[in-house]
């Protein structure tokens, strides 16, 4: 699977609920055994690959990432500028 296809898969999961938890996406991608798609960081957390995130960001310009709870959601009028909230 390419990073673009992985990002499209993430987009489909996001569209189902209008949110997507990082751990859910990364765990699924990790099972594909390609560190370009997902990996463990230095703290042992499962993470979505940087190329996948770049593609996902292109596909979702009106989506923000909640850093505290580690999930993507639709942007609200009350959100600060930028991707991360």
Image (cartoon, rainbow, N blue to C red):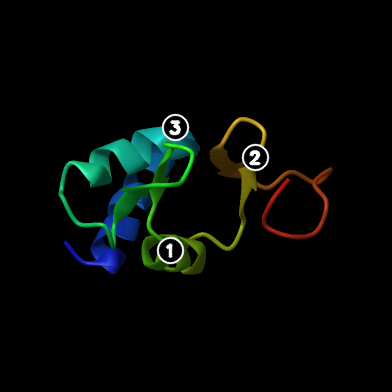
Residue placed at 48% from the left, 38% from the top? Answer: 43
Residue farthest toward the front in the current orientation of the protein? 42
The residue at which mark 3 appears reads as 17
Q: Nearer the viewer, mark 1 or mark 3?
A: 1
Of pointers 1 and 2, the one earlier in the residue sequence: 1
Residue depicted at x 50% and y 36%: 19
Q: Are marks 1 and 2 in contact (CB under 8 Å)?
A: no
Can you give x and y, in whole percent of width and height, for residue 74 in the image? 61, 44
Q: Earlier in the sequence, mark 3 or mark 2?
A: 3
In front here: 16 or 70? 70
Residue 47: horizontal and vertical position, in percent?
41, 46
Give neighbour class at mark 2: few <14, some 14-19, many 20+ (Cα, 10 Å). Answer: some
Residue with the mark numbered 2:
66
Q: Is residue 4 left or right of residue 83?
A: left
Q: Position of residue 13 (x, y in %)?
A: 35, 41
Looking at the picture, how far across and down is residue 27, in whole percent?
Answer: 30, 37
């Amino acid at each position: 699977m390419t990073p673009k296809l992985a990002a499209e898969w993430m987009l489909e999961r996001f569209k189902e609920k209008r949110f997507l938890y990082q751990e859910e996406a990364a765990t699924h991608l990790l099972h594909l055994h390609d560190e370009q798609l997902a990996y463990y960081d230095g703290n042992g957390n499962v993470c979505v690959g940087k190329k996948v995130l770049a593609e996902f960001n292109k596909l979702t310009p009106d989506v923000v990432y909640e850093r505290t709870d580690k999930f993507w959601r639709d942007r609200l009028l009350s959100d600060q500028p930028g991707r991360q909230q």
